[in-house]
Image (cartoon, helix red, strand yellow):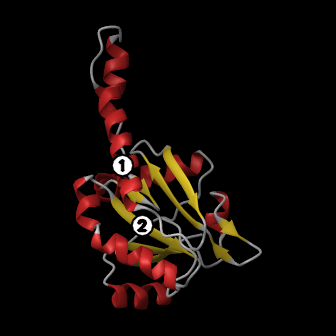
């Protein structure tokens, strides 16, 4: 998820919602990542104060460079906008929504979208009589849904970070490299 700034009232409400709903996202096999133009030090203090256990990424220098590649950086304001993207394990954006800055995203809508992406993935993986052997094998080896900035499937974070970053970068997306808990610099 992209959000404008640590410590602002709407962003604080948004993070409080995510913190309270983490169990629901964990059951959907997703990992939340937050991105803003704040520094890693601001993220660290903010995460400690808010009880945030998911990673916060600092798109700090050059300011907004990664977010700009997703169309989320608001250069005239010097901040990131508010947006959520669902990225499947194959590294493709499966769902994306921009929100007005003063609007806290509806997490039920986001969870429903993640559920829909998972259902499509299951449907895609189910064998069909009209598929040939190669198509069935390819469908069976493709990965399922995840959230990017968002929510990544834990399997990607644990086992496939480099491959995902390479895949997204090849598609024109900018992604930070290693993302430890709470914060890291991207860009």
Residue plotted at (61% across, 66% down): 100
Q: Earlier in the sequence, mark 2 or mark 1?
A: 2
Numbered disc 1: secondary structure: helix
The numbered dot on residue 33 is 2
Q: Residue furthest top?
A: 130
Instruction: State whether residue 130 is above or below residue 142.
Output: above
Q: Residue at x 30, y 76 (%)?
A: 53
Q: Quadrant of the C terminus?
A: bottom right
Q: Which mark is residue 162?
A: none
Residue lying farthest right? 76
Residue 54 visible: no
The 10 Å Cα crowd at callout 1, few under 14, some 14 to 19, many 20 or more, is: few
- Displayed quadrant of residue 48: bottom left
Left or right: where does residue 81 sit relative to residue 122? Answer: right
Q: Nearer the viewer, mark 2 or mark 1?
A: 1
Pinpoint residue 9: horizontal percent, then vertical percent. Answer: 50, 85
In the picture, the disc for residue 112 is: 1
Q: Is residue 44 visible?
A: yes
Vertical position of residue 124 compared to residue 109: above or below:
above
Q: Residue 112 at what x, y percent from top left? A: 36, 49
Give the residue drawn at x 27%, y 24%.
126
The quarter of the displayed image where residue 118 is located? top left
Q: CA distance from mark 2 to mark 1?
A: 18 Å
Give 81 or 42, whichever is nearer the viewer: 81
Q: 61 or 67: which is nearer to us?
A: 67
Res 50 → quadrant: bottom left
């Amino acid at each position: 998820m992209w959000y404008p700034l640590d410590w602002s009232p709407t962003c604080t409400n948004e993070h409080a919602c995510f913190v309270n709903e983490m169990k629901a996202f964990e059951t959907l096999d997703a990992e939340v990542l937050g991105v803003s133009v704040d520094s890693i030090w601001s993220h660290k203090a903010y995460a400690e104060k808010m009880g945030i256990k998911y990673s916060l990424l600092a798109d700090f220098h050059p300011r907004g460079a990664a977010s700009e590649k997703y169309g989320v950086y608001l250069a005239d304001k010097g901040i990131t906008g508010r947006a959520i993207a669902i990225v499947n394990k194959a590294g493709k954006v499966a769902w994306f929504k921009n929100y007005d800055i003063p609007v806290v995203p509806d997490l039920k809508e986001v969870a429903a979208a993640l559920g829909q992406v998972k259902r499509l993935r299951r449907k895609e993986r189910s064998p069909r009589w009209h598929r040939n052997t190669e198509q069935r094998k390819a469908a069976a080896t493709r990965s399922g849904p995840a959230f990017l900035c968002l929510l990544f499937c834990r399997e990607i974070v644990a086992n496939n970070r480099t491959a995902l970053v390479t895949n997204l970068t090849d598609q024109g997306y900018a992604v930070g490299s290693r993302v430890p808990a709470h914060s890291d610099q991207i860009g």
